[in-house]
Amino acid sequence: MPSPVFELTCELMRRASVTPDDAGCQALIGERLGRAGFAIEHLRYGDVDNLWATHGDGAPVLVFLGHTDVVPSGPAANWTSPPFEPVVRDDRLYGRGAADMKSGVAAMVVALEEFVRAQPQHAGTIALLVTSDEEGASIDGVRRVADEFRRRGQRIDACVVGEPSSKQRLGDLVRIGRRGSLTGRLTVRGVQGHVAYPEKANNPIHAFAPALAALVAERWDEGNDAFPPTSFQLSNLDAGTGADNVIPGELHAVFNFRFGTASTAQALRERTEAILRRHGVDLGAGAGTLDWWLSGEPFATPAGPLRAAALAAIRESCGAEPELSTGGGTSDGRFIAPLGAEVVELGVCNASIHKVDEHVALDELERLPALYGAIAARMLGGR
């Protein structure tokens, strides 16, 4: 007979919840947790659905955090089986969201159901927060919910993010923080003209090239014990009309910093703008523009109750001594950490996420609810 976590994962995967469409996933989860005695609140902002489910009261407040949205599948013809029809092959469950992260959400739901059934009078508050805006703009999802929590005075002491963190086997890596992400969108304006008459034009590519070389060569910081040195990467560069005899009139560039606590977003902005000015890239008087987007600040969770509970649960359930990492991209944990919460990320292997034929190993899926439940038991009393 299929297990509860397998069945729920498949039910969620059949819903084509491409961000920001929840496609009914949260209604299903809310109904289940409501029957288990959780208080259910649906928070919808714009096109984004957020679900806040709580059981118990008072401190400590332990939150399990996930998302019901997925990235687009791309052409279905490229998949071995339909992307939104879960299929088991070779002891793996295939389909969009199998690893990122409907298996994690399902495991959290099953773990919470089983925990409150076994310990209805548990200490503190156990909660689930899920959004449909993690894979998209991340504006009306957990970012917006965190603002609402600040307004209400809702505390969160500890948060387990169910993102697929593991590398080779369940529990071999736990993320205890994430780097910040700062994006710059630059426009350099020149004067379009004929390549044979450069004196009558102003090439923005030539203006930007020395500044770009300086930005790439810059040592932004040395990192620290929690984070590697800050990384600068140019992700998009566009200029020209496509003709070989036209000097372009504009250049557009997009670049990103991934930074730890050795630098601040403000300092990175100021240093970037100083380098551009030093190399003759004018951002004033209509000559160019630079717009910034701070996706999230860096955070690192020090040793504390949640880290101790997660590591003990992994050792017991997985027989592993996990690597503690602040690497990778970003997650919604960046919005919860500033509320004063300890945050760890723990989930299944991430090798196939966002790919064609995304999958999760069945043995990892079946073990994940017990792992989350063991963390809850250690945090909220009893075992």
Image (spheres, rainbow, N blue to C red):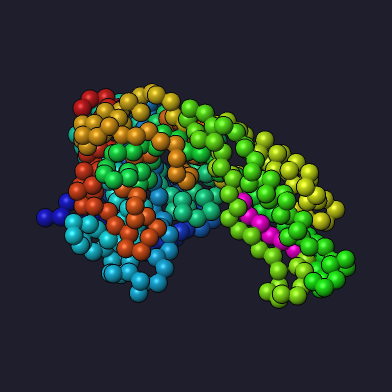
Closest to the observer, 191 or 355: 191
Quarter of the picture holding the N terminus: bottom left
Where is residue 171? Give x, y as percent: 28, 39
Horizontal relation, residue 130 to residue 144: left or right: left
Where is residue 232? Give x, y as percent: 59, 45
Closest to the observer, 304 or 43: 304
Q: Residue at x 35, y 50 (%)?
A: 350
Horizontal relation, residue 25 to residue 182: left or right: left
Quarter of the picture holding the C terminus: top left
Quarter location, residue 147: top right
Residue 37: in sight, yes or no? no
Does 122 appear above or below 209?
Answer: above
Quarter location, residue 269: top right
Where is residue 246? Give x, y as percent: 76, 73
Closest to the observer, 68 or 27: 68
Q: Residue at x 75, y 63 (%)?
A: 250
Residue 328: in sight, yes or no? yes
Q: Residue at x 52, y 28 (%)?
A: 224
Magenta stretch, residue numbers? 250-255
Q: Main secondary structure of the magenta part?
A: strand
Where is residue 214? Give x, y as percent: 69, 45
Does 70 appear above or below 244?
Answer: above
- The residue at the far front in this view is 196
Horizontal relation, residue 369 to residue 105: left or right: left
